[in-house]
Image (cartoon, coloured by chain):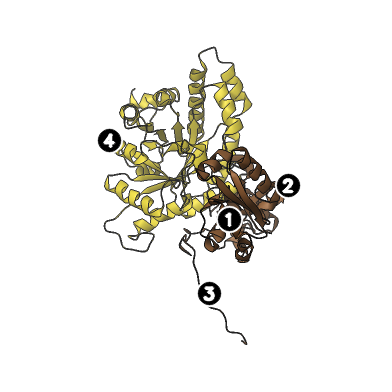
Amino acid sequence: MIRSITRQKPLAEVLELLGEMERVFIIGCGTCTTMAHTGGQAEVLAMKQKLVETRKVVTGFMVIPVACDNLTEEALQQNLPAMKESQGLLILTCAFGVQTINRFLDFPVIPALDTLFIGKEIGPGLFEEVCIQCGECILGETGGICPVTSCHKGLLNGPCGGTNNGKCEIDRNKDCAWTLIYERLQKQGRLSAMRKFQPAKNYQVEPKPGKTLFELERSGN
Amino acid sequence: MARGLREVLRSGEFVVTSEIGPPKGSDVSKMTHHIEMLKDKIHALNVTDNQSSVMRYPSLGGAILIKERGGEPILQMTCRDRNRLALQGDLLFAYSRGIRNVLCLTGDAVPVGDHKTAKSVFDLDSTQLLRAIRVLESGKDMGGNTIEGKVEFCAGAIVTPEARPLEPQLMKFEKKVECGAEFFQTQAIYDMDNFRRFMEYARRFPVKILAGIVLLTSAKMAKYMTENVPGIFVPQTLIDELANAPKGQALKKGIEIAARMVRAIKEEGLCAGVHIMAIGREEVVPEILQAAGIGFNGQKASDAGT
């Protein structure tokens, strides 16, 4: 399953963001940040402990099952009294969760995590980005491996000169996407796909900020 | 005035190019000194573009300085720092200032440089930039709009004959040819047998290849390059040769090695010429040329009477 991959901000940064807020309510998420061990029950309790140690008052805490879901509104209502006692919400969900909570409540929101990318867990504690949602899918010509996401430079026409024995110039732990694509296409006897010139990409398929309205097909067709 | 690079490439003479790196700052005196020193000893001079993702005086500025001093500049353009609007605009500006040669590169990654938190662009890649040049030459921009005044460039690219795996690089080389590259300057080569094999392949294409000669200054540098720099292979025999040089003589040995390679490539007629890169040691390029028996404008030293 695709996940929002997050990392905890350093405590010093969290404290700086909280500033003069003395009473804080903490929110975690039961889905992505639980799996990534950045904002599940255990991390929420650990954060509570750290805040208490810095002489903050934690008025309450909760772990919402799926913070980015619309049901979050109901979950939040149940904890309104404790939230009202706080001066702000410290949120250990991804940025989608923070913004969802922000839509339903009018409290100051402070993110305790940084959202890194949308990806999946491919091993214990190992996460990989899978799609940057570019709006112009090229996977059919790249052996099902996305160079827009997996090549550091997002190159469309083959590897750069920084490729090194299958690894990327920026990090020996990162695979060169174009070497993977080459190997896959070679195995499938489809190297001709790699020889095709890809023209300059359309980076405005859905201009930022993404907002699109699909016409719903009428039923009965 | 220097002859145009395209004319030289077509003449069949042994072509010699080199490169200068612009300064970190606005003081161009050292770069200007290098330009004065090299401009009449080689056919054309590259100017690197924020090389290794390190912010510097722009390649366009360096190319204009070369042009103003009667040299023949090769403007290096990477896709890392500019989108297609900026790249096309700079090409128009370059043409208006008499710059006729462009080397199209992807560009190193931002995190390897000195502004590690910068946003990298890569709106185009090197093949698409080559194509953009040919589109501009047709009188249109990439948006399909008519441009006023013509542009015309001798466009080149790079290729890495020692890349592992090699085939994806060769496929990209062929795309660059397809997109309009007329000449290639290779990544540094040190193994002549590997380079011969590469040339057996590359000779089939209607492009001129200039072999990349990067000056080795010590055994330590050679070892570092072969172990860490993508696409570079330095044979152990060369590392040993540098290591065995008398104390303080490693640079001299490096010059000798570079000159030997240039001479071998020329005598064997392996490719159209050489591109000599003496990163940070531009002042020794004339020594390499002299030791290789290359005199004024690519002629033998004896022919030129120097």
Distance from label 2 to label 3 (Cα)? Answer: 38 Å
Distance from label 3 to label 1 (Cα)? Answer: 37 Å
Between B151 and A121, the residue placed more toward the observer is A121
Q: Nearer the viewer, mark 4 or mark 3?
A: 3
Residue identified by numbered label 1: A83
Check whether the beta carbons of the residues at disc 2 and disc 3 lie within 8 A of each other: no
Q: Characterize the local packing of mark 4: few (<14), some (14-19) or many (20 or more) Cα atoms within 10 angstroms.
A: some
* Marker disc for residue A214: 3
Element marked by disc 2 = loop
Element marked by disc 4 = loop
- Do dots 1 and 2 share one subunit? yes
Sooner in the amino-acid sequence: mark 3 or mark 1: 1
In the rendered structure, which amino acid carries the disc numbered 3?
Phe
Between B238 and A203, the residue placed more toward the observer is A203
* Marker disc for residue B279: none
Residue identified by numbered label 2: A124
In the rendered structure, which amino acid carries the disc numbered 1?
Met
- Look at the image and give the colour of chain B: yellow
Residue identified by numbered label 4: B70
Q: Nearer the viewer, mark 1 or mark 2?
A: 1
